[in-house]
């Protein structure tokens, strides 16, 4: 978590894939700066095919050492050359730029054999 990507400008994340596929994407954010406050780090997450999300990783929860926020996008369609961009909110004065502590992607199989299941598959285990 302490080796996060951060920038005072944009962070662009590109995937080297050269084919189309469906995927699940999760971003993990944690504000580890002990001097941060509610307006220290506010930025947007631009994921292709989704509406831009406003992100503020700060939390003032007294019972937490740090706050972890997770943004997950399901059933995404990846197109080669599409970049994910984290960029500062230009409408507020936020001294700290975007941050991404971790990113997790899962490619979803479009093979019809991977989706062939039914209720009997689970019921069989119950009766054993």
Image (tube, rainbow, N blue to C red):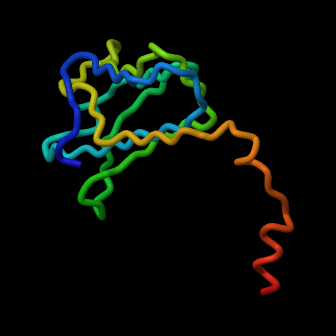
Closer to us: 66 or 107: 107
Is residue 124 placed above or below 49 in the rendered structure? Answer: below
Is residue 74 placed above or below 9 in the rendered structure? Answer: below
Q: Position of residue 24 (x, y in %)?
A: 54, 39
- In the figure, residue 56 lies in which quadrant? top left
Is residue 57 placed above or below 81 in the rendered structure? Answer: below
Q: Position of residue 85 (x, y in %)?
A: 37, 20
Q: Residue at x 38, y 23 (%)?
A: 16
Q: Is residue 32 left or right of residue 29?
A: left
- In the figure, residue 81 lies in which quadrant? top left
Q: Residue at x 56, y 35 (%)?
A: 23
Q: In what quadrant of the picture does the C terminus appear?
A: bottom right
Q: Is residue 42 left or right of residue 81?
A: left
Q: Is residue 9 left or right of residue 113?
A: left
Closer to us: 18 or 14: 18
Q: Residue at x 42, y 25 (%)?
A: 45
Closer to us: 127 or 56: 127
Closer to us: 109 or 12: 109
Q: Residue at x 47, y 26 (%)?
A: 53
Q: Position of residue 73 (x, y in %)?
A: 55, 36
Q: Position of residue 109 (x, y in %)?
A: 63, 40
């Amino acid at each position: 978590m302490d080796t996060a990507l951060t920038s005072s400008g944009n962070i662009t994340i590109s995937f080297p894939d050269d084919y189309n596929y469906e995927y699940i994407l999760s971003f993990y954010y944690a504000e580890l700066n002990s001097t941060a406050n509610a307006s220290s780090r506010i930025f947007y997450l631009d994921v292709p095919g989704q509406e831009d999300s406003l992100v503020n990783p700060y939390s003032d929860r007294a019972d937490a050492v740090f706050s972890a926020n997770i943004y997950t996008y399901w059933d995404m369609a990846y197109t080669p050359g599409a970049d994910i961009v984290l960029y500062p909110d230009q409408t507020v004065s936020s001294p700290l730029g975007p941050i991404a502590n971790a990113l997790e992607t899962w490619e979803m199989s479009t093979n019809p054999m991977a989706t062939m299941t039914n209720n009997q598959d689970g019921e069989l285990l119950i009766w054993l």
